[in-house]
Amino acid sequence: MPKHYRPAGKKKEGNAAKYITRTKAVNYLQVSLAIFRKLCILKGVFPRQPKKKVEGNHKTYYHMKDIAFIAHDPLIEKFRQIKVHRKKVKKAIAKKNRDLADRLLNRPPTYKLDKLVLERYPTFVDALRDLDDCLTMVHLFAALPAVDGERVEVKRIHNCRRLSHEWQAYISRTHSLRKTFISVKGIYYQAEVQGQKITWLTPHALQQVLTDDVDFNVMLSFLEFYETLLGFVNFKLYHSINVNYPPILDPRLEALAAELYALCRYMATGSGRVIGNSESGGAIKEKEDENNKASSKADESELRLAQLQHQLPANEPGALMHLVEESTAVDTDDDETKECKSLFKNLKFYLSREVPRESLLFIIPAFGGTVSWEGEGAPFNEVDEDITHQIVDRPTQSHVFLSREYVQPQWVFDCVNARIILPTEGYLVGRVPPPHLSPFVDNDAEGYVPEYAETIKRLQAAARNEILPLPGDEDLDNSLVAAMMDRTESNEAAEKKKKLEMLEKQYHDELKMEIDGVTFSNLSNKKADKSPDTMDKDDTKSYHEEDEKNQAEKDSADISTALMSRKKLGLYKAIEIGKERKRDKVELLKKRKKNAESSASAKRR
């Protein structure tokens, strides 16, 4: 018998020992498939793709270390207790023991995900880097209808709204917003927090319908972890600017309506009146007991923080704009933050009722502007004479104040992306606004620069008083590079000019022949009598030169590819395919632009 002989089935090696299928993992952990899926989501465990799939390509594989990592987590025991608790409730109801069932329902097993957040994100920067999907998911559920009986609990939706409001309040207070873009999916935002760029998507303020095509159990498992993560992030960010967390809202403004965006500052002392709301959305209860005046301010502050956990956040995004107190720390803002902070400085905005209010109430204060809206609880009314801009999204405006400008909402987004105050002529009421350009696209890298992007560049240069210097010794290389980049455009313009000159010459020749009385039959006979030797020698020479040039380029490319290895050749072909697709895309954009210009000119006629 060989020395290293091992009987079959005694011990596994290689991929068979490193990876395990999902069915075997569920049996190993002794949990159901739903609980296993939830554990993987909470712990951050995902399927793997081994090089050799031992049990077939149609199965899902996990790393054995990940499964052992889940098996030693205390959370799996909590899920087993929850399963046992549900069986006890079901058994009590079946035996018609209602008292026992009520006692069990009032004391269900609970668990927290605090340790999982610290386990998955050892440092705060790691949490910020992974915050994109978290914010998108929380803002998505914050926009869902809070209706009892639906698949999503009302308190979960209210909690998502509260977390999203607190995040937007911090971004607006610290002027960390950098980019924004309106798309069909929703509104994209990008903020820079502690050197990390965070991008998230918020849905449009429309009526959302819960469809059956989405597995809400999986999404709610992700949301459960994201709620805890965003709560920790908000706590850390608020304390970084010397502000207590969680914030307490003004109950009087909350009681007005659900669409109000007004909040008060923190109650610095304990003289304020506290109103607490039950989780089921009951009526507001006021506490005006005079005996509580003798208690200390610290006890009252702790009472407010405890009551906030049960407070129903009826406000909408943007309500925390004026919540954060001014920090007394030293001003350490960078140049970009200062630029964003002063973009809408000394400008006063008023929002009409038809505009996307929640988005504008978040963007305008983030760039230093003052904003109000139409409704109760607004800081100032529409008749305020200090209003400089009124945001309107309707074909016509009935009453007009001559002291302000009426613009469309797109003007605010374009000003934010351009970082300058754009002219309002193209955004007036009733006009078709300029194209809304995405700040997330690099036009130079794509090879196509829209016309309005060139206009914005000129306006930015004029706003910064920039004058292009003459090319000297230092700028000679830059000017040469720019000249090489513009060579293609200049060649296209020269070809178009040459074609126009040829057409103009042909027109004059035909007009001259018509005056001389030359008929079409005589002209065709003359052309037939001409021999090939009478062709234009210059055109023939230029044609041959161009053909020789193309052939030389093709031969050099063939020689280069012949010396490449198979791997490099595949990479080269992939690069060429990418360039060809980019050229086709640029040609398509130019064609669309030409068609749009021709249709616009036809309408003017």
Image (cartoon, helix red, strand yellow):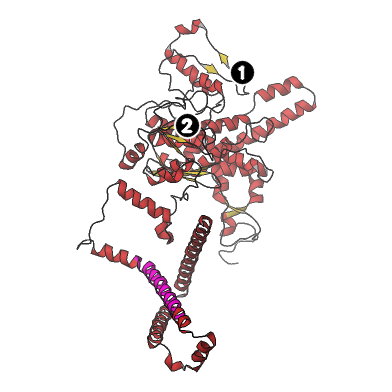
Q: Is residue 399 above or below residue 417?
A: above
Closest to the observer, 310 or 60: 310
Q: Residue 185, image x and y in percent?
A: 56, 46
Q: Secondary structure at mark 2?
A: helix
In this rendering, the answer to whether 307 lies above or below 585 is above
Would you identify the image quadrant in which residue 241 lies?
top left
Q: Is residue 129 visible?
A: no
Q: Main secondary structure of the magenta part?
A: helix
Marks 1/2: CA distance?
A: 24 Å
| Farthest-out residue, left | 473
Q: Residue at x 27, y 63 (%)?
A: 479
Q: Quadrant of the N terminus?
A: bottom right
Span shown in magenta: 485-510
In magenta stretch: residue 33: no
User: Which residue corresponds to mark 2?
Assistant: 166
The residue lying toward the viewer, choosing from 323 and 330, is 323
Residue 58, picture quadrant: bottom right
Q: Residues within 10 Å of mark 2 (few under 14, many from 20)?
A: many
- The percent position of residue 121, horizontal first and vertical second, equals 46, 41
Q: Is residue 503 on the magenta stretch?
A: yes
Mark 1 lies on a secondary structure that is loop
> What x and y, as percent, mark residue 26?
65, 46
Q: Amino acid at mark 1?
A: Ala
The numbered disc on residue 444 is none
Asked whether disc 1 touches disc 2, contact meaning CB atoms under 8 Å apart, the reply is no
Relative horizontal placement of residue 122, taking residue 4 as reference (left or right): left
Question: Where does label 1 land, which residue?
Answer: 283
> Relative to 211, is 563 on the left or the right?
left
Give the side of residue 442 with respect to residue 309, left or right: left
- Name the residue located 79 percent from the left edge and 28 percent from the top edge: 94
Mark positioned earlier in the residue sequence (1 or 2): 2
Q: Nearer the viewer, residue 459 or 138?
A: 459
